[in-house]
Amino acid sequence: MTATVKSLGEQGLLKIFRQYCSAVVGDDAAPMGATLPDRQMVATTDMLIDGVHFSDRTTSPEDVGWRAAAVNLSDLAAMGAKPWGLVMSVGLPPDTEIAWIEGVYRGFSECLQTYGTELVGGDTVRSPVRTLSVTAFGQVPKTQVIQRHTARVGDVIVMTGLHGLSKAGLELLLKEELKEELLVPMLIGNQILAGEDLVQAICHYHQRPIPRFDAIAILHKILNQQNHPTDFPVSGMDSSDGLADAIAQICRASKVGAKIHWRSLPIHRAVRALAGDRALEWVLYGGEDFELVLCMPLSLAEKFVNQLSGAVIIGEIIDGDRIDGLEMRSAFQHFAP
């Protein structure tokens, strides 16, 4: 007989969850380390709903857990913060298989271990739909907080990596026949892959997003090697809702415009093969790539892109409120008609 949440009960379920938690879990709340005088505490929260953010058709339990952690960690990285800890609450139908929820926690824990943080608490409730609610806490030097509203005219726009590959991965997971479009070996990351290896690597972009803490580490290293003004010269956010949406949100918050260097905008061969004449649309509006879109002075950007593989300058901040060539829409709107 398959073990379910109903057959195990809440206390039995909690016993399983504790093996994935920090040692601080057990009291009514988790004590947080004292914030240093020069540090700013930041927090972010995100929910994942079965049928909206994941499904058994496209996402294994382990990948659901990884994504639940990664989407929140990406928000911390976008602020320039290092993670302190995360809490996750789960809502589960009684017939949820224990194997599924254990897989979720394994994937969640794997992601946290990869980025040097831990699960410090959460809650479990009965729910008609499988639901994960995650809150992440991080710390960032007070003088190095990355925000959306500080972009300046003359800054250049940098993206940390390729866009459109998460959309490509999702399409491959939903449409088996699209694999036939990937018969030619392609460079993915630093490997040339073909056949099923190529398909799996592209699907991985959707199933296991990577928070770009590596980009933040390089940025801080460059800034620490030079005297930068007290007024922090970097603004930005992550591109979880699409590259175009990130640029638009930064411009709105900063009350500036943007000019995109279309010839500098890279489009991966796999995106071109799968999307055809919609390739640019996938890059701009596909969403869930979880790269960083940063605005900074050209001198800093040149050092940054030289040290971060895959980073590229794609435009510049201009005066006014015009955003060159971009349709103002997000990759996904929860309450759109």
Image (spheres, helix red, strand yellow):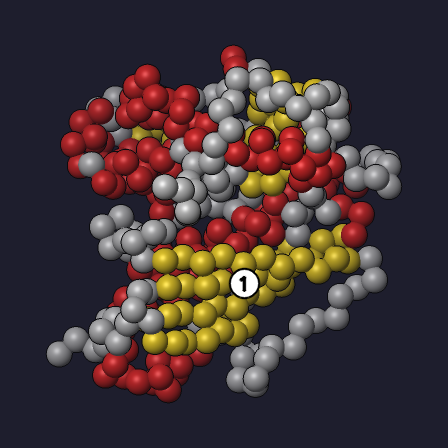
Viewer-closest of 307 and 153: 153
Percent coordinates x, y for residue 312 in the rendering: 57, 25
- Give the position of the N terminus as an image quadrant: bottom left
Q: Is residue 316 visible?
A: yes
State whether residue 117 is above or below residue 316: below
The structure residue drawn at horizontal position 52% and vertical position 22%, both measured from the top left corner, is 326
Count of number-bearing discs: 1
Viewer-closest of 13 and 192: 13
Q: Is residue 156 visible?
A: no
Residue carrying label 1: 135
Q: Residues within 10 Å of mark 1 (few under 14, many from 20)?
A: many
Dot 1 amino acid type: Thr
Q: Please tell me in which quadrant of the rendered image residue 56 appears.
A: bottom left
Percent coordinates x, y for residue 86 in the rendering: 54, 65
**Label 1 residue SS:** strand
Viewer-closest of 108 and 130: 130
State whether residue 223 is above or below residue 313: below
Percent coordinates x, y for residue 255 in the rendering: 70, 31
The structure residue drawn at horizontal position 26% and vertical position 29%, both measured from the top left corner, is 194
State whether residue 20 is above or below residue 310: below
- Give the position of the C terminus as an image quadrant: top left
Q: Please tell me in which quadrant of the rendered image residue 248 appears.
A: top right
